[in-house]
Image (cartoon, helix red, strand yellow):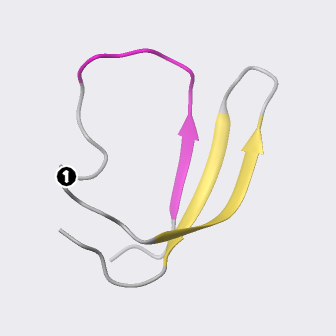
């Protein structure tokens, strides 16, 4: 169980790669912070708000 997910999203186009969450995972998250930088990078922080649906 994680207390908070913090991610930096860099603008890129990719067709394959490793998933952050397993396919079919429906996390219940609340955004607690978000920032956008001049180079297009976005920082987002989420906290789990309850159980998830697998």
Instruction: Where is residue 23? Give x, y as percent.
Output: 18, 49
Name the residue located 42 percent from the left edge and 71 percent from the top edge.
Answer: 28
* 27 lies left or right of 3: left
Mark 1, secondary structure of its residue: loop
State the quadrant of the N terminus: bottom left
Q: Residue at x 71, y 60 (%)?
A: 33
Q: Nearer the viewer, residue 28 or 32?
A: 28
> Residue 6 occupies which quadrant of the picture?
bottom right
Task: Give the percent coordinates (x, y) of residue 52.
Answer: 29, 75
**Quadrant location of the C terminus?**
bottom left
Residue indicated by mark 1: 22
Residue 7 x, y percent position in the rendering: 53, 47
- Quadrant of the rendered image containing residue 39: top right
Residue at 49%, 17% (x, y): give it.
12
Tell me if residue 50 comes above or below residue 9 in the rendering. Answer: below
- Rendered residue at 70%/23% (across/down): 40
Residue found at the far right of this picture: 38
Q: Is residue 18 above or below residue 16?
A: below
- Magenta highlight on residue 46: no
Q: Residue 3 placed where, x, y %? A: 47, 76
Indicate whether 13 appears above or below 6: above
Numbered range of the magenta stretch:
5-16
The image shows residue 34, relative to residue 53, as above or below, that is above
Q: Is residue 10 magenta?
A: yes
10 Å neighbourhood of mark 1: few (<14), some, or many (≥20)? few
């Amino acid at each position: 169980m994680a207390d908070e997910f913090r991610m930096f999203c860099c603008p890129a186009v990719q067709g394959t790669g490793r998933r952050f969450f397993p396919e079919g995972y429906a996390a219940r998250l609340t955004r607690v912070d978000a920032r956008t930088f001049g180079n297009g990078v976005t920082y987002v922080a989420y906290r789990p708000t309850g159980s998830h649906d697998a």
